[in-house]
Image: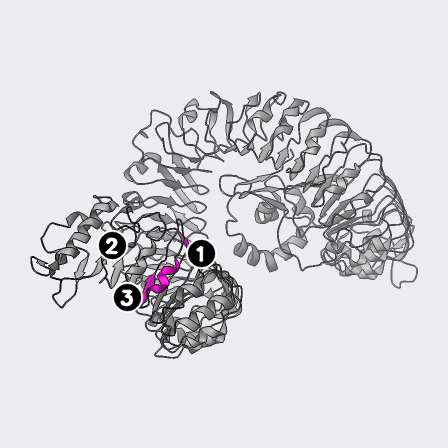
């Protein structure tokens, strides 16, 4: 056969086939760079994407049509499959969206076939296995509609591909067990060098037969459910350069020998939370360049020998349990460009990075790093773009050299202890600076004027520091790219006059936080069409909420709480608003209708004096938090409030609401976590309608006029933590129906008409977490059973308790329970219930018999009140074990015998009342007992001691003279300042009661624990703008 050549090398039939292929393909001419230029020259061998053989015969041996925007036109009739001399075919990154044509099998000379991300779909045909000369096969895909290997399976596909060196099937649905796919590869592909099957729905474990593939250099099996340990044989591959096993649910201990493979360059084990391990000592001459262990469970230290890995350029160890210091030898890693050690437990100072001149990214956030950071650590790093040191304990000044790096884009130093002033920015520096976050530090002084010259700044967060001075808001107009501004919680005064001020040229800000900035008027933000988050809380803004707020059409978050607002100029018609916080203002009149898609509404602590609108439930279809507490509302709870499907917190406390509690409200506790109706005028009985799937954690019905019994269906609320029925008229026996609720922390039945014995039959682990119990002012009788009290393990934990408070996480926001405790006849409110606070009040009942000795095990107790009962016998000496006890009231009983000398060693005891019993003998001596006056012991005819100015008959020496014995005064301000964030802004009295205990506890524990785990101590935690927390309050 005579085959003519067309203009040089290209054969005419080859050119015709190519032109026919172009004609049949559907492609985007604007995206194409190859097909659009075919036929521009007469020699097809010169066309882009075409390679002919070197022998001059004009045969097309290579065709590359990758990234050509092809979206159709390839089927079994295509001229492509007549190019029988093709050795290399690349159709990757197109959009064929069709099954693989079986005529690929006609291209029997193919050595390399690349169909990656070409959007072929469906079953891979068995015909591909006929391409026996293949050395490289790539059918991988990232996203989209994937190929699958079912019939034929993987074993059938590769059975004839003995020459294959590269098998790349990422994203193909293979769905095979470990032994099946492992043996299929090891038996058919003896020359395999590259194995890449990430995201192929493979199961584990890695079969031992894979060890036979001795030529493997690259193993990529990420995103498969291997669910097995990493086998030791992986360390035996002599040519292994890359091992990628991320997101494989690996477990067990990772073999350290893998780190020592001389040829290994890339190791990726990230996102295997059950995989444990630690680093070995690294010897020299290793090849490791990329080390990715993020979100695994590695621990131990980072060895000094890591400095021997001279080629190491990328380190990611995020979210592990590494401890110790960051070794100084890391300075030897001159090739390092990316370092992320965040979310570990590293401590001590950070080393210098000056020799790592290629460094672009440094993240050391969320560790325990301390000390000052010398400015010289960052000098010469001209490529550095990102520095994140948040959530550590760095102190000293902010290193000024960070501001002189021209490539810098983000500096994030929040939640540390940096002090001093913010350095000025050099005029020519930081032209690319995008983010500046210095929040939650101890920075002082004014904001440098040069900050407002950072033309490309996108995020500026200086909140929660000690900055002072005046900031005129119109200065922000120089920051034309600014989208986030937060100056909250400093000592700043922000000047933002009314609508006549020059704020019309401000940049289009998306998030504006000016909480506690001494604002007196609303900033005129009418033109801020992109504003979606606005926090102006905790200021002195007076007057009405301006009507133009409703013109901010994309607003999602609005916090105007803790101001002096009196009215809304017009209803808030903001369809996109999801969070609305207006609490602690002076708003009056009727309850305003919330926007339609609201999820969080807080109208508490205002002067609203209407009824709750009958149709209020129509506005709460998507609401999970709704509070009207601390207003002057009257009338009944409308039935429409029961129509809400998502409500998790409903707080109507401290109003004048009346009528019966709607049954539908109780029936809705399948989703409701908190129901607070305290301090209203509700009457009738509690509806016995709690559903089997009750989700309540807090039920507070105290301070009403409720009668009847505790509903039996309340036992369905198996996750209940706080139950307060105090100050009602409930007439029932002890609620043993709740004995199986193991989550109980707080039980208050105070001031009702409960009667009978306490304790429940069949006790088995009842209420192991109970920390506050108040049964006072009822008609309980008998002796509290030992076996019942012995189950209250939460009161026996002593000092091994964490400083926390009871709160519920609500989609990133928090609700905190409050409770009233009685001390010396006065009621005080714990605005936040600390998990370390425990109390037991059994006073004013008819308990009799001896005090149960088991109470001596309650080592966590702070307050114990058994007064005004008919208890007899002696005071248990085991009370000397109550090492946390600060208040003990046993008055008005019939106790006999001597006061146990063990009470004298209760060093935190600040309140003691043993009056009006039948005690006798000498009052124990000791520094603590000498602080109590005669009031603590009066009414005991047989007692003597200097507190009563009575000498005992068996003592020698002269009679004690009467002396003036004043009770110690307690430093209220000290405690309220130091622990105010725990008990809330309204509580200064309770710390007075426990002053001595808390001062000592603070010095040994709080200073260390709080600053580490609660770095935003200076922020007002009950303000939604910074901590997005809501507290239940009582005036």
Residue position marked by numbered label 1 in the rendering: 173
User: Residue most toward the left?
Assistant: 7
Image location of residue 727, percent across then percent down? 77, 34
Q: Is residue 33 visible?
A: no
Residue position marked by numbered label 2 in the rendering: 80
- Circles 2 and 1 in contact, beta carbons < 8 Å: no
Sequence-earlier tag: 1 or 3: 3
What residue is shown at x 71% (from left), y 27% (from top)? Answer: 662
Sequence-earlier tag: 2 or 1: 2
Q: Going by the image, does 644 lie left or right of 3?
A: right
Answer whether residue 117 is magenta in the image. Answer: no
Q: The residue tagged with tag 1: helix, strand or loop?
A: loop
What residue is shown at x 36% (from left), y 65% (from top)? Answer: 167
Q: Which residues are magenta?
A: 125-150
Q: CA distance from mark 3 to mark 2?
A: 16 Å
Image location of residue 807, percent across then percent down? 62, 45
Q: CA distance from mark 1 to mark 3?
A: 24 Å
Q: The residue tagged with tag 3: helix, strand or loop?
A: loop
What residue is shown at x 57% (from left), y 25% (from top)? Answer: 618
Examine the rendered structure and indicate whether residue 967 appears above or below residue 322.
above
Examine the rendered structure and indicate whether residue 555 appears above or below residue 89.
above
Residue position marked by numbered label 3 in the rendering: 111
Q: Of circles 3 and 2, which is in front? A: 2
């Amino acid at each position: 056969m005579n085959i003519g050549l067309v203009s040089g090398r290209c054969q005419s039939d080859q050119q015709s086939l190519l032109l026919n292929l172009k004609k049949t393909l559907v492609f985007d001419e604007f995206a194409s760079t190859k097909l659009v230029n075919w036929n521009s020259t007469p020699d097809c061998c010169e066309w882009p994407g075409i390679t002919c053989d070197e022998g001059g015969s004009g045969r097309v041996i290579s065709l590359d049509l990758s990234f050509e925007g092809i979206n159709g036109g390839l089927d079994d009739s295509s001229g492509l499959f007549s190019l029988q001399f093709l050795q290399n075919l690349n159709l990757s990154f197109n959009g064929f969206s069709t099954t693989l044509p079986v005529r690929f099998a006609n291209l029997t000379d193919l050595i390399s076939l690349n169909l990656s991300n070409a959007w072929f779909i469906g079953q891979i045909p068995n015909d591909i296995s006929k391409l026996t000369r293949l050395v490289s096969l790539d059918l991988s895909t990232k996203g989209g509609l994937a190929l699958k290997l079912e019939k034929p399976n993987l074993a059938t596909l590769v059975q004839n591909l003995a020459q294959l060196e590269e098998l790349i099937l990422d994203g193909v649905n293979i769905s095979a067990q470990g032994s099946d796919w492992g043996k299929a590869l090891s038996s058919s592909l003896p020359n395999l060098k590259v194995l890449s099957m990430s995201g192929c729905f493979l199961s584990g474990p890695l079969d031992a037969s894979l060890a036979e593939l001795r030529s493997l250099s690259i193993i990529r099996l990420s995103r498969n459910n291997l669910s097995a340990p990493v086998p030791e044989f992986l360390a035996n591959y002599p040519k292994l350069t890359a091992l990628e096993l991320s997101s494989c649910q690996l477990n067990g201990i990772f073999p350290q020998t893998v780190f020592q493979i001389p040829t290994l360059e890339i190791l990726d084990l990230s996102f295997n939370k059950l995989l444990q391990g630690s680093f070995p000592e690294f010897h020299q001459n290793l090849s490791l360049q990329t080390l990715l262990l993020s979100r695994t469970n590695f621990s131990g230290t980072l060895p000094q020998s890591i400095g021997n890995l001279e080629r190491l350029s990328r380190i990611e160890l995020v979210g592990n349990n590494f401890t110790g210091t960051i070794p100084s030898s890391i300075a030897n890693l001159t090739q390092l460009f990316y370092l992320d050690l965040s979310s570990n437990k590293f401590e001590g100072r950070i080393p210098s990075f000056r020799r790592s001149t290629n460094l672009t990214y440094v993240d050391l956030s969320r560790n325990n790093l301390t000390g000052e950071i010398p400015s010289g650590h960052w000098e010469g790093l001209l490529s550095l773009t990102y520095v994140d040191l948040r959530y550590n304990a760095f102190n000293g000044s902010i290193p000024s050299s960070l501001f002189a790096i021209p490539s810098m884009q983000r500096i994030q130093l929040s939640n540390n202890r940096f002090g001093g002033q913010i350095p000025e920015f050099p005029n020519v520096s930081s032209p690319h600076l995008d983010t500046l976050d210095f929040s939650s530090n101890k920075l002082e002084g004014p904001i440098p004027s040069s900050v407002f010259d950072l033309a490309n700044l996108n995020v500026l967060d200086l909140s929660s520091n000690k900055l002072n001075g005046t900031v005129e808001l119109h200065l922000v107009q120089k920051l034309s790219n600014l989208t986030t501004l937060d100056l909250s919680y400093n000592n700043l005064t922000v000047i933002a006059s009314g609508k006549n001020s020059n704020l019309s040229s401000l940049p289009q800000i998306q998030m504006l936080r000016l909480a506690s900035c001494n604002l007196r008027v609303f900033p005129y933000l009418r033109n801020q069409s992109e504003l979606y988050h606005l926090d102006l809380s905790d200021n002195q803004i007076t007057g009405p909420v301006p009507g133009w707020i409703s013109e901010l059409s994309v607003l999602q978050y609005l916090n105007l709480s803790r101001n002096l607002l009196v009215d809304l100029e017009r209803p808030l018609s903001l369809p996109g608003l999801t969070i609305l916080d207006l609490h602690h203002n002076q708003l009056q009149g009727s309850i305003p209708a919330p926007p339609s898609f609201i999820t969080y509404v807080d109208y508490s602590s205002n002067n609203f004096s209407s009824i709750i609108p009958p149709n209020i439930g129509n506005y709460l279809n998507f609401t999970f938090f709704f509070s009207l507490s601390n207003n002057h509302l009257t009338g009944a709870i409308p039935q429409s409030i029961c129509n809400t499907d998502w409500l998790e917190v409903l707080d109507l406390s401290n109003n004048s609401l009346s009528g019966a509690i709607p049954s539908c409200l109780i029936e809705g506790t399948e989703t409701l976590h908190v129901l607070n109706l305290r301090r209203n005028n509700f009457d009738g009985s509690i509806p016995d309608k709690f559903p089997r799937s009750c989700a309540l954690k807090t039920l507070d019905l105290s301070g009403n006029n409720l009668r009847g019994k505790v509903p039996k269906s309340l036992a369905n609320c198996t996750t209940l933590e706080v139950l307060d029925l105090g100050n009602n008229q409930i007439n029932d026996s002890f609620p043993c129906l709740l004995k199986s609720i193991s989550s109980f922390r707080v039980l208050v039945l105070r001031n009702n008409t409960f009667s009978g014995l306490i304790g429940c039959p069949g006790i088995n682990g009842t209420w192991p977490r109970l920390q506050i119990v108040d049964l006072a002012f009822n008609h309980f009788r008998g002796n509290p059973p030992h076996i019942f009290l012995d189950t209250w393990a939460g009161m026996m934990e002593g000092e091994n308790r964490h400083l926390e408070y009871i709160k519920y996480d609500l989609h990133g926001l928090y609700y905190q329970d409050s409770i009233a405790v009685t001390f010396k006849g006065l009621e005080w409110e714990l605005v936040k219930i600390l998990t370390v606070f425990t109390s037991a009040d059994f006073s004013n009942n008819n308990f009799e018999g001896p005090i149960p000795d088991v109470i001596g095990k309650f080592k966590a107790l702070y307050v114990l009140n058994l007064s005004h009962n008919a208890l007899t016998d002696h005071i248990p000496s085991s009370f000397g074990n109550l090492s946390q006890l600060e208040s003990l009231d046993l008055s008005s009983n019939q106790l006999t015998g001597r006061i146990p000398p063990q009470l004298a060693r209760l060093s935190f005891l600040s309140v003691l009342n043993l009056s009006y019993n039948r005690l006798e003998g000498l009052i124990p001596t000791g520094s603590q007992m000498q602080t109590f006056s005669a009031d603590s012991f009066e009414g005991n005819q047989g007692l003597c001691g200097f507190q009563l100015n009575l000498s005992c008959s068996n003592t020698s020496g002269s009679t004690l003279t009467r002396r003036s014995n004043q009770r110690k005064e307690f430093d209220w301000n000290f405690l309220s300042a130091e622990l105010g964030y725990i008990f809330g802004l309204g509580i200064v009295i309770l710390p007075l009661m426990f002053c001595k205990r808390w001062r000592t506890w603070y010095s040994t524990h709080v200073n260390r624990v709080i600053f580490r785990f609660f770095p935003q101590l200076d922020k007002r935690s009950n303000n939604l703008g910074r901590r997005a927390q809501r507290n239940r309050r009582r005036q």
